Image: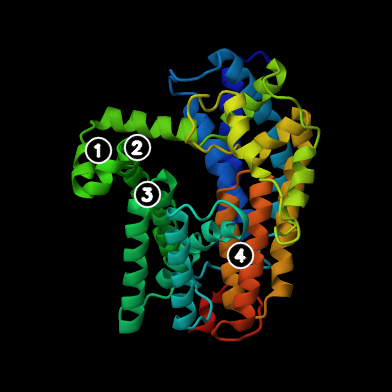
Amino acid sequence: MTFGISPLQELQIDSAVITVLSLLALWFRFWSKRLITAVAGLHANVFLFLGVGPLLFTFYESEHERLPLPDLIEAMATGASMFLIGYIFVVALDLWFERPAQRVSYRPIVAPPTSWAWIILLLVFSASGYAVTALGGGTMGAGTIFPLLKNFLYPVTMLVVLRFDRKDVQSALLCSGVLLFGLFVSLRSAWRSELIMFLGSMGLAMLLRSPKSAAVFFITGAATLFVLIPFQNYKKANYEETSRSLAQAFRESQSLNLQGRTDTVKEFFGIRVNSTREMGYVLKGVEYGDVDSRDGATYWEALLQLIPRLVWQDKPSFNQFTGYYLSRAIGLVGLDDENTSWGVNLFAEFLVNFPAAGLVLFVPLVFLLFLIMDRFMVRVFSTPAAFWLMECSLFFLCFQLVGVVNAATFYLWTFIFVFALDRFAPHTRRPVQNAYVDAKSKA
């Protein structure tokens, strides 16, 4: 009990405030043309996973929790309060340092100058990533680059949508080809997030092209979730049947009434899109002795992860603890479930190592680190195309951010790969000044 309110009310207030603050930070970056950055990706992650998801959880009557619900909500409220204190400091500084130099009306964002050959090359890399990952070749050693390659689908999707010109046949054909490929692989994927991420990247690019239609995009996106999430849940539960007939699976998944769809969406966000719930499970897991405090060992392992396997041939898979064992030890995943891979988020991972009060300093530190990365990219890449690809990749990496070992691995591979493309791939070479080319330069 805090200030005369219950843990449930405290969690609702914290989650609502986090939702508003993160939305404010995203809105400000949108209008100052700094949306496609690592820091903005973190704000988007906070908006959904620490704001909307936990808030919907408080209105969802969960019957599947492996912890007593009052104990879980109390722990979630503790984690959310500590996170909120640190996040208030982050948003205040972000609004101050990223404010536009002058008040001007928003101009649509235009994609950086990029050759079509460069985009096709990225699409080929993405396709190879999907193919090798589907065959199980992206889990160990140098194979970990393939899950990274498939994630290039999102920046490529944004590029072709931003560059789409209905009067240009080449532009229309390439945009259609990329969107059809993305729709095909995301529909066939066993992961529920693939289709949502693909459609989200397409919608984000359309929003950047036409910011005045923001209200229409948000309403359309929300309505789409009521169709998409029931289908994705059906596909996960009946993957083999869905693979045989997508049309039949879609028809059967849409048999829910409005109340059923609403409950499905609330359950999806309240359970899967909920970093605060993971923090609650971790806090109780440490308290009950289900898992020992690691006292910072996770961050040492993140540094060791950067050592190439060519140098350290017997290097262990450091991601196994956070991505597999931890979720089972604390009860997020059943011990009898051998297939589900559930890596807890960056902030829940922190709580395995240090007390909850440390989030007050850890949250600003994480945002500062990615802000430094954003500023560092301007000095490293020689072309706007490579700079866009790196920043856009970081945006989606931060939006899906899991643990620190995972983040370190993906960041390192992304940087090496984009740096090589910057030096050797065919594209238009111009000095990097910003992630975007201002629309008025096209006028």
**Residue, disc 4:** 391
Number of the label disc, if any, that sits on residue 233:
2
CA gap, disc 2 to disc 3?
18 Å
| Residue at position x 26%, y 44% in the image | 242
User: Are the residues flagged by discs 3 and 1 in contact, CB closer than 8 Å?
Assistant: no
Q: Nearer the viewer, mark 2 or mark 3?
A: 2
Q: In this image, 437 relative to 188: left or right?
A: right
**Depth order, front residue of 41/306:** 306
At mark 4, the secondary structure is helix
Image location of residue 49, percent across then percent down: 55, 39
Disc 2 marks which amino acid? Asn
Query: Is label 3 in a helix, a strand or a loop?
Result: helix
| 134 to the left or right of 441 | left
Alpha-carbon distance for marks 4 and 3? 24 Å
> How many discs mark residues in the rendered view?
4
Mark 2 falls on what kind of element? helix
Which tag is nearer the camera, tag 3 or tag 1? 1
- Image height check: is 243 above or below 267? below
Q: Position of residue 419 (x, y in %)?
A: 65, 73
Mark 1 closeness class: few <14, some 14–19, many ≥20 residues within 10 Å: some
Could you tell which of marks 2 and 3 lies nearer the N-terminus? 3
**Residue type highlighted by circle 4:** Glu
Q: Residue at x 44, y 82 (%)?
A: 116
In this rendering, which labeled residue sits more in front, label 1 or label 4?
Answer: 1
Q: Which residue is mark 3?
A: 221
The answer to whether residue 256 is visible is yes
Query: Mark 3 or mark 1, which has the lower sequence index?
Result: 3
Q: Earlier in the sequence, mark 4 or mark 2?
A: 2
- At x 61%, y 22%, the residue is 10
The answer to whether marks 1 and 2 mark residues whose Cβ atoms lie closer than 8 Å is yes
Mark 1 — residue? 253
Q: Amino acid at mark 3?
A: Gly
